[in-house]
Image (tube, rainbow, N blue to C red):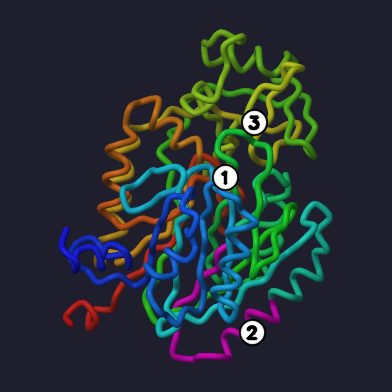
Amino acid sequence: MSPDDKAELLTGGSAHGQPAILCTAQVRCTDVSAVAQLSEDLGPGPFSLISLLVSPLADFGDVVAQAERIYPDTDVLACTTAGEIGESGYDDGLIVAIAFPAAGFVTTSLLIEDIRNLAVQQVVDRIALRRVALQERILDMADEFAFLVVDGLSLSEDTLAATIAPALRGMPIFGGSAGDGTDFRQTLVALNGRVAENAAVLTLARSKYRTKVFSLNHLVPTDLKMVVTGADPAKRIVKTINAEPAAREYARIVNKDPEQLDRFTFASHPVVVRIGGTHHVRAIQQVNKAGELVFFSAIDEGMVLTVATPQNMAEHLREKMTELSEEGHPANIIGCDCILRRIEAEQTQMSRELSDILSTYNVTGFSTYGEQIGPLHVNHTMSGVAFYHSASDEKR
């Protein structure tokens, strides 16, 4: 690799011969000078925002503290992951950095704490004040979006997303729930040196570049339906389906051994719920000791669940990336990709093909415990934002 090629790669060199808009870098989380190396690879900036996507194998607190020392005057948000999306697609054991150059972006970030006991009006008021202040700062940056990272074990993403979206007054929002590999023990977020559980970081951004927030999934509803007849919504637990023990009835419907249900079963036999004319995934996380189903997102009694069947994930992702390129190729894409998609890719031996597509389209991001799009918390999807040069930029 030539020095020029290496430099382009480290700063997020784009596919299709386009110059990058974002600066990206990655290091192995075992590197003792990881954050210093990331800083060197990102370049001098200045940056309006830096996002760190941190493998659960890293010392998250130490990474955040190092970043605060190196970037005392720049907003730095961070979260733990269920896997990373780096320069070669799916990966593990990385710290991935995404930096937003100040010449092209103006941002403001806020830490929202104690989200299980959300002070709704206070949060709405804080967001409204930040949104108005941001709009008044730089008038020539017309495109806007919001990015949310949230504790993936808080069980509060649904309420939070439904609270935040209306306060944004039409600003498109996407995001992901922080992960912990496949351990489900501890998920963390941070802003400017402060590490928190039961919390979220919301960033509002305006850009001189064209942006497009998107969400995609490759699941098609079938005719197999089931009704939740017993649930503990606060804990996202389904106790009974069709008045039968939940795990056993789910297994019967998808024709599986109830004693052999695992994350691969849930990834290949997801269930969806119809909301406003569109089906959204309500993914199953695990079977608990009582034989109940624990879900990744909101669930309640009376909800009708439909079993979905996956399309070819690689073909579907390639098709959606092509759609995002219809009015010009994205220079960068940030992706929040559900851990269940990665699990399904491993099960179907598509990981390498999917990684190649993600790399080709310069997707950087992380695997999540759930995704936010608009007012919804969803699963088994990829949500994200694509960045585009203007026609005049592309000719330079």
Q: Regarding mark 3 in the picture, which secondary structure is present there?
A: strand
**In this rendering, position of residue 348 left or right of residue 53:** left
Q: Which residues are magenta?
A: 128-148
Of labels 3 and 2, earlier in sequence is 2
Q: Position of residue 211 (x, y in %)?
A: 40, 70
> What residue is shown with label 1?
56
Instruction: Write down the residue under mark 2.
Output: 132
Q: Relative to 297, is 380 on the left or the right?
A: left
- Side of 311 relative to 300 (left or right): left
Question: Which quarter of the rendered picture does the N terminus lie within?
Answer: bottom left
Q: Residue at x 30, y 70 (%)?
A: 20
Image coordinates for residue 170, horizontal then vertical, percent: 57, 71
In space, the residues marked 2 and 1 are separated at their CA atoms by 36 Å
Residue plotted at (61% across, 49% down) = 377
Q: Is residue 157 above or below residue 350?
A: below
- Disc 1 marks which amino acid? Pro
> Who is closer to the viewer here, 25 or 294?
25
Closer to the chain start, of discs 3 and 1, is: 1
In the image, residue 143 lies in the stretch drawn in magenta: yes
Q: Is residue 51 left or right of residue 116?
A: left
Please identify, in this view, whether the residue under mark 3 or under mark 1 is nearer the observer.
1
Q: Determine which residue is flagged by label 3.
A: 304
Please give the name of the residue rendered at 31% of the width and 41% of the height, measured from the top-left corner. 354
How many labels, in total?
3
* Residue 220 visible to the viewer: yes
Q: CA distance from mark 3 to mark 2?
A: 40 Å
